[in-house]
Image (cartoon, helix red, strand yellow):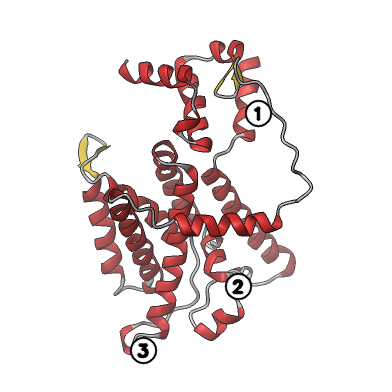
Amino acid sequence: MTSLNYDFKDKLKNLNVFEKIMAVNVVVFFIGWLIQVFFKIPRSSTLSWLELPKDFLDFIMMPWSILTYGFTHYDFFHLLFNMVVLYFVSRSMVNLFPSKQSLNIYFLGILAGGLSFLVVYNVFPSSFSMTVGSLVGASAGVNALLIFLCAYMPNRETRFFSISIKLWHIGAVIVLFDVIGLFGVNQGGKVAHLGGSLLGYIYATQLLKGKDIGSGFGEFVDRVVGMFSSKTSLKTVHRSKKNTVAGHNKQEFNEFNTQKKIDVILDKISKSGYESLTKEEKAFLFNAGKK
């Protein structure tokens, strides 16, 4: 019972960055629902201040919308689908890549999707595009992560029921369906999907060459966050880590079963990177991988 209570509290306290993003998406969805209920506003207008408008002049008046549209959903199944895919894709990302790099890919995908949407409906001839409304949804960021994985490790196989499928096959099918969707009713959404997918593909191919194209974006975000950080909270508390394993004392760690031990070490990797592991933690993970 004590272990169960600890696991629950530990999970709430240690949500990874993408789980926090999913939580924000859910909160924004329910804020829109509450606005509809209490102010009798049509559901499709409750979050209009977060949508990315199609017209460039309208966008100039709402520059924040290039990011906030990625946290905005009106349809429950739209939200559910995006969050389920984000959950499974992000689990692979945070276990294989630094959390900061994964976040760069996700948010650059949101930006690329939004910019693609604006370009298509403000630069291309009107005959090329259908009549669409504003852009909402996290799909561009989700696609960026998914296509990044498919391009970075194209020959890695995953199981779909009893069939083994290479990741590049999955990526190709996703892009194909989005291209076909350009001729459907959700043209604006498909344009954003393709923008996010293109970003994910370029990011992966450049990273394979040793170039992280998102590092500049990450540094910019760090500077912006630093501007709003409290300058008074500079005190650092140093704790001895000699008797801890993945943030838990050795007695607690030894009480966990093998899978739980692996989970807490992987959680540490997702937050601080593989280099932050101690020799003992690396050895345990290595030995567990051989079993």
At label 1, the amino acid type is: Lys
Is 145 drawn above or below residue 16 in the view shown?
below
Circle 2 sits on which residue? 48
Marks 2 and 1: in contact by CB < 8 Å? Answer: no
Labels 3 and 2: the sequence-earlier one: 2
290 or 125, which lies in front? 290
Left or right: residue 77 compared with residue 168: right
Alpha-carbon distance for marks 3 and 1? 54 Å
- Three-letter code, disc 3: Ser
SS for callout 3 = helix
For this rendering, which residue is in front, 210 or 110? 210
Query: Mark 1 or 2, which is nearer the eye?
Result: 1
Q: Is residue 243 depicted above or below 73 in this figure?
A: above
The image quarter containing residue 33 is: bottom right
**Which residue position is annotated with label 1?**
9
Q: Residue 289: x percent and y percent?
A: 34, 21
Q: Earlier in the sequence, mark 1 or mark 2?
A: 1
In the displayed structure, 60 sits above or below 66; it is below
Q: CA distance from mark 1 to mark 2?
A: 36 Å
Where residue 108 appears, as percent x and y from the top left, is 45, 60
Q: What residue is shown at x 56% (from left), y 15% (from top)?
A: 253
Q: Are marks 3 and 1 in contact (CB under 8 Å)?
A: no
Residue plotted at (50% across, 21% down): 260
**Residue highlighted by disc 3:** 126
Comparing 163 with 24, the one in front is: 24
Label 2's element? loop
